[in-house]
Each structure stands twice: as C-alpha cells, then as structure tokens.
Amino acid sequence: MVDARVAIDCMGGDHGPHVTVPAALDFLKENPQTDIILVGLPEVIHAELKAHKAEPGPRLRVHAASEVVTMEEAPAVALRAKRDSSMRVAINLVKSGEAHAAVSAGNTGALMAISRFVLKTLPGIDRPAICTVLPTIKGHTYMLDLGANVDCEPEHLLQFGIMASVLVSSVEGRERPTVGLLNIGEEDIKGNEVVKQAAGLLRASGLNFHGNVEGTDIYMGTTDVVVADGFVGNVALKTTEGLAQMMSTLLRREFKRNLFTRLAALCATPVLNSFKRKVDHRQYNGASLLGLRGIVIKSHGSADRLAFMRAIERGAEEVRGGMLRHLNERLAELQPHKLRAAQAEEGAA
Amino acid sequence: MVDARVAIDCMGGDHGPHVTVPAALDFLKENPQTDIILVGLPEVIHAELKAHKAEPGPRLRVHAASEVVTMEEAPAVALRAKRDSSMRVAINLVKSGEAHAAVSAGNTGALMAISRFVLKTLPGIDRPAICTVLPTIKGHTYMLDLGANVDCEPEHLLQFGIMASVLVSSVEGRERPTVGLLNIGEEDIKGNEVVKQAAGLLRASGLNFHGNVEGTDIYMGTTDVVVADGFVGNVALKTTEGLAQMMSTLLRREFKRNLFTRLAALCATPVLNSFKRKVDHRQYNGASLLGLRGIVIKSHGSADRLAFMRAIERGAEEVRGGMLRHLNERLAELQPHKLRAAQAEEGAA
C-alpha cells in the first residue's frame, strides 16, 4: 500500500536535476511504500534518470512542466509569468490531490508566494511560517518562523506555536510538545510588547507553553518548539550558520599549521568525523511551509543528494503522520471563534 | 605619566572581590601607566588584597562604598534605594572626573539605569546601547545593541552605527570602519520597515555603510561593525553562546566514547587548546555602554580573573583612544540639527 506520494520540483535549487533526481532515487530505495512524481523538463529528467540507470514506473512518474523559476526571480514574477514552472506544477499536484506533498529547493520567496496562491492558508491561520529542525544537545528542536513574516502580531506567534506543536506531535508522536517563546530573558517583563502579549496568548492557549526562552536555549534543547518572528528567527539561524562555519574553518586551520598538528589531525579524524555527522546540517535539511492547505517542504538551495533526500523524507513523514488533519482538528479546538469567522467568510465568498 | 584611571565595582558579578581584585592586580602588572580605584566594602577589599600579598598605594586606591547591588535586583530599586552601592559610587567617580572609566560585572539593568541617571546620555544620542566585540574568521567585529533597547526607531539604529564606528576608530585606529545593518537578506527590499528606513539613514550619514548584512556575516567578519536592535542583537549573541556550548559538549562526549577516542583526544589536545584560545569568549569580555557622558564597561557576571582583566583593559583602551572626545566631535559633525536642539534644551534647563 502506498503511504504517500511526493511531487518533486526537479528544476529548483543550485544544482537542479543533478541533485534532485538521484536524491529521489535514493529515497525510493529506502522508502518502499512512498511514490514520487518528478516534475520538470521531461527531456532533462529522463536524461538524468538514464544517467543513473533508472527509468520511470508506477512508483516513479515524470510529470512535464515547461518553465523554471530561477533562484533570483522576484516572487511576483514567478507567480504571474511562469504558470507552467516545475515549482508551480508540483504544488498544483498537491492542490489536485495527485500528490500529498511538494518538495522544492527553489527560491524561497517564490515557493511561498506560489504555495499561498495555489493552496491558500488553513482556516484560522493568517500567515504561513517556515519551520526547521535544529540539532540540540539533547536531540533536536523545531524553530519557526525563519523569515516568511518579518513583522508579526502576537496572534501570529500564537498560530506559529500551534502549528509547530501539531507538527511535532504528528511527526514524532510526542503527546504535548513543549513550546518556548524566543525572548531576551526568561522573566515575563522582558522583551517588546508583541512578545509580551504573545506570551499571554500562548499561556492561555492550552498548548504546553514553557514560557520565554533565550537564544542559548535553542541549542540546549530546552523546549521542543521555539517560536519567534521571522526576522529574529532568520537572524538566529543564519548567525549560527556563520559561527559553525567560522569554527570549522579555524579548527581546520589549526590542524594544518605544521607537521605535528597534521599528525594530530590524522589521529583525531575518525572522532571529528563522527562529531561532524552529528551536527551535519544536511541531516536537518527541509523546512516546512506550515499553515497551508497542503504540505510543502523547502530544501536549502545548495542541498546535495543526501540533504535533498532528507527534505523528501520530511515531506513523506508529514504525510504519514497525518499532520494536516491533526492541524485542522487542533485549530478547530483551539481557535473556535477565529475558525468560525474564517469559515463564514469562505461560505459567503 | 598616568594614561587612564579606572574605577572598579569590586562587589559586582557572581564572584565579587575574589575575581575583581586579583584581576585588577593582574591588570596593573601589565599596564604600568594606568591606575585603578577599587570600589566596595573596604574590609572585604583589604582582605582580598592581603590574600594576594598586595596593598593599596598611589596606583591602587581603595574607595569605600557601603552597599552592594545584587544580581537579581530590579534596576529601579538599585537606583533609588542603594545610593552608596559600589556600582553607583564607581560611576560617580567617572562623573566627578576622578576616574575615566568604570567597570562592573554587576546586574546589567541596574548598571545601565544608574549610568544613564548619573552620567546622562551624550547630546545627539537618544538611547545608550551595549556593544561587544566578537571573534570572526578574519579577526573580530563590534556588534550592538545587545539588549538595552528592545524597540528601536530607525534613528536609534543610525546612532548605534555612529557610536560603534567611532569606538572602532578610537580603539583600533581604523580610519573608516565598515558598518553593516543586520537584516534577513542583502537586498534593500528585505526586512521590516524600521530596518529599511535605518538603511536609508545610514547610507546618507557619511559613515562607511556597507549595507545590509545577514546573521552569517557576523562571524564571517564582513563588516567592522554590525548594527541591530537590542532584541535581535541579544538573540543573535545568546544563540551563538548556545551553539558553542552544544558543540563543545558534543565534541567532548565524542572524544570520551572509548579508549581509542580518548587516545585521539590526547593526541589532539594541544591543537584543540590552541583553537579554544582563539575563540575563547573570555578574551572578548567587556561590553561598552555607549552613548553616555562617560565610559562604562559591563563584564559578564560569570567572568573569571582573566575575563574580568580583559574588561578592565577595554575600559582603559577607550580612555587612551579618546573615544568620548571623538564621539562628541563625530556627533557634532554628523547630527548638527539634533545636537543643536539638544544643546538648546540643556541651556534652557
């Protein structure tokens, strides 16, 4: 029995089909119950399949799309001028129900704009958010938003908390994930007005709200979910990318200084490699666009084969966990008023 | 000739005089032209001096203060109820001109409140900011604000840029330090309204404005100065503290796994230690409270002897570099209108 069908925007990302197609083949090998639809320029996809001695079949379909959204393209242009882009067609497949999730390594702004336009947001959700998984000292944590919403109202931060909380429950089977609100101190009096009001909403929401957390808590794994507005979340994420890059460069430099340090490096290599695997950002690739009426996963543009396969897996996991159904139920439970208003509006339209 | 006289709040911080007094003695040994005033409970300070076989003299005075601001105290309480605290007395010495800088490892909120109340802000500056030095792949960078101002107007971010720019020029002798504005993308259209307007002000300011920088750029050392509001700056700083802590814990765990990895650790220890010295946060201890009519340095509360000595050095360097004079000149140059209005107000008061 097929447990999920994932549509892949094969043309997106820095490497396009050279990465997305072999990653899909790797995924199929490890996931015998999940099907794939490869979306993009058919001749390019077929050539890539051939290069990997693979061919289409019932579990691996090729779906044509004649255009490609570039990495630099303005979201509005991608949305209006490229109606047959691989990105758009992959999302259309989710909309029509032919696929259960779409995965793309393309331009984030375009992916968000097209997803919102085609799929629409869920009733009770004002704005979708981008949510990623990060390694922590205890395991991992889910952080959102990472840049989709630069100015947030308290209500939006509450919605982010609800969405990520349901995501963790669905994918990890954890009952009541803890939710932390990113702030500059643990005390209630800390932070700006938006964060203070959001804390009040989260506390009254019925979620397992831990309270304020600080930047340090993200990687300490203090909570299962860390909620922030898109500006703060993006800066936090990218700052750690910079620090990790600096530390690995300086460490490499240190190990290359002279013959003695090179020998030491040789000695330490297996340990350092095992450490690297644990904090390897590729393992955590694949951010969820949460709040849409469909599952969309954004891969890093620079993802390699392993990283892109992880993003496909993330999409499949959300489908298998029934994330959308759970989210709809939870929204109905937690935000009845809001939901009713949204439904009334929809009925009238 | 004495090049600077630094007042030290000996009672502040997690360890109080056990750290501050020996750190001051270390500092004096390495800085033969700089004097120290130890401020706090005299009997405690004298006991600590005795324990280190040191005694007061013309270069090392003890100045009595009968109260201590605790680490948890509300800033308003520290300000109103403890007029003879070691923190307040140290800042009073800067106000009266007996000292050129004050250094404290005490409660940040109290230190900022007392400094603002006693010293006042510089003409042309609306709000003081906290600025720290961070290691980068190329050397180091100055980042502000780190939490004093959670809601900033574009004008405030401009002022932060001016202050840090002058700080870098004064302390490092660098002519026109580059200034970056922390944002979620390099393009002008990115970010929230405040950041977009701040970019316009910075571009028109005559500073060496590089443009927007992302979180990654902080540790890549893209610019000499990174400007952010206090919420974002605080989260960025603390997030990296968390990541650094996680990475060192996981690495240690990896090296302790079995006999083989322990041997590898032994082998790699000198290299790892040399790496650790390079990114040792103690070397970067001492954040400047910028924008006041006096030099105030905030040390980490948990600072040890080496770290606290670095904070004293930072204060002395700002005095020697003529930071305040340069800042006054620069403010007069860059913000003549604002300055004139502030001066008129002062004349009227």
Image (tube, coloured by chain):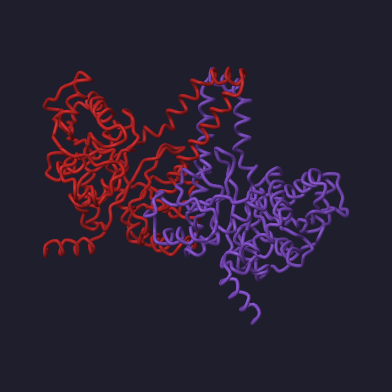
Chain colours: A red, B purple
Tell me: residue B291, above or below residue A7: below
In the drawing, does residue B117 fall left or right of residue B208?
right
In the drawing, does residue A99 fall left or right of residue B126?
left
Q: Nearer the viewer, residue B62 or B140?
A: B140
Quarter residue B36 falls in: bottom right
Quarter residue B109 falls in: bottom right
Residue B216 x, y percent position in the rendering: 46, 43
Q: Which of B157 and A80 is in front in this view?
A: A80
Quarter of the image where the C terminus of chain A is located: bottom left
Q: Which residue is drawn at 59% across and 28% down?
A: B272
Q: Which of B66 and B137 is in front in this view?
A: B137
Residue B240 x, y percent position in the rendering: 51, 43
Residue B263 in view in this figure: no
Residue B293 x, y percent position in the rendering: 67, 65
Tell me: residue A176, above or below residue A285: below
In the drawing, does residue A111 fall left or right of residue B165?
left
Q: Residue farthest to the bottom?
A: B348
Quarter of the image where the N terminus of chain A is located: top left
Residue A213 in view in this figure: yes
Residue B239 x, y percent position in the rendering: 49, 46
Tell me: residue B170, above or below residue A38: below
Quarter residue B144 falls in: bottom right
Q: Residue at x 61, y 65 (%)?
A: B333
In the drawing, does residue A65 fall left or right of residue A287?
left
Q: Which residue is drawn at 68% across and 69% down?
A: B118
